[in-house]
Structure formats: C-alpha cells, structure tokens
C-alpha cells in the first residue's frame, strides 16, 4: 500500500498492472474508495451558524477595536489598521482575515449609502 505518494498513478481508481517495473507496478489490485470522514468537515461554517452569527452582529454591532480599525481603513491607513488589529487579536493571519471582513463591511455600507 502506497501512502502519501506524489505519483499520479497511486491515486484512487488507478489499478496496478502486475509488472515489477513502471509507473503502475505491483500486484494487480483496485484502490478502495473511502467515505469522507466527518472530521473533514471541521472548520466549515454551517448555514445555521452563519445565520446566528449575522443576527448577533446585527444586534450587538461592532466591538470598539473593530470600529477604530474601520476608521483607520476609511482613512486609508491599512498597514496601521492591520498592526492595530494584530495587537488586539493575537496573530497576523487572524488580523488579515479581520481586515478582509471589515473592508467588506465598509464596501457594503458604501453600496447601501450609509
């Protein structure tokens, strides 16, 4: 059994040819097609959770640090805003995601005419 091979012939559905050499070498077998594990869904936001989060956002509004960051973004101080958010929430990756979210909110507000 080949594990984590970069050989394209080792992917599911390609069977061995029974030869001792070549790209499909080995005893003639057929790869099993495995069911997707529930753990593969980890991190995927469901429709229910997305709806609940949007309602909470609508009711509670933005945190003070988010409002300040939005003001920095509006004044085209993106780098300063990213650094500010990073200090507040911990990692640069999370800060970039939050920046993306806030810029989308600002764009949505502009489209709505607020």
Image: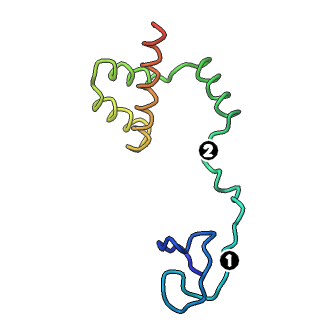
Q: Is residue 47 left or right of residue 95?
A: right
Look at the picture and state if 83 lies above or below 17.
Answer: above
Look at the picture and state if 26 lies above or below 108.
Answer: below
Of the residues under marks 2 and 1, which one precedes in the sequence?
A: 1
Helix, strand or loop under label 1:
loop
- Residue 49 lies, in percent from the top left, at 67, 34
Judged from this view, the residue extending furthest toward the bottom is 20
Taking the spot 49% from the left edge, 10% from the top edge, the residue there is 112
Q: Nearer the viewer, residue 106 or 58?
A: 106
- Residue 16 lies, in percent from the top left, at 60, 82
Q: Residues within 10 Å of mark 1 (few under 14, many from 20)?
A: few
Look at the picture and state if 79 lies above or below 63.
Answer: below
Taking the spot 71% from the left edge, 33% from the top edge, the residue there is 48
- How far apart are labels 2 and 1 at the CA level? 32 Å
Helix, strand or loop under label 2:
loop
Mark nearer the viewer, 2 or 1: 1
Judged from this view, the residue extending furthest toward the top is 113
Taking the spot 56% from the left edge, 76% from the top edge, the residue there is 3
Contact between labelled residues 1 and 2, with CB atoms less than 8 Å apart:
no
Q: Residues within 10 Å of mark 2 (few under 14, many from 20)?
A: few
Quadrant containing the N terminus in the rendered view: bottom right
Classify residue 37 by image quadrant.
Answer: bottom right
- Residue 6 lies, in percent from the top left, at 47, 72
Q: Is residue 20 left or right of residue 49?
A: left
Q: Nearer the viewer, residue 40 or 65?
A: 40
Classify residue 66 by image quadrant.
Answer: top left
Counting the numbered discs, the total is 2
Which residue position is annotated with label 2?
A: 44
Which residue position is annotated with label 1?
A: 30
- Colouring used for the render: rainbow
């Amino acid at each position: 059994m080949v594990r984590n091979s970069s050989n394209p012939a080792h992917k599911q559905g390609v069977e061995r040819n029974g030869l001792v050499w070549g790209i499909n070498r080995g005893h003639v077998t057929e790869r099993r097609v495995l069911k997707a594990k529930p753990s593969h869904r980890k991190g995927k936001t469901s429709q229910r959770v997305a709806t609940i989060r949007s309602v909470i956002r609508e009711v509670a509004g933005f945190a003070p640090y988010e409002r300040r960051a939005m003001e920095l973004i509006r004044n085209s101080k993106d780098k300063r805003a990213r650094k500010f958010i990073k200090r507040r929430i911990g990692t640069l990756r999370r800060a970039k995601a939050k920046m993306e979210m806030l810029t989308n909110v600002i764009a949505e507000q502009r489209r709505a005419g607020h």
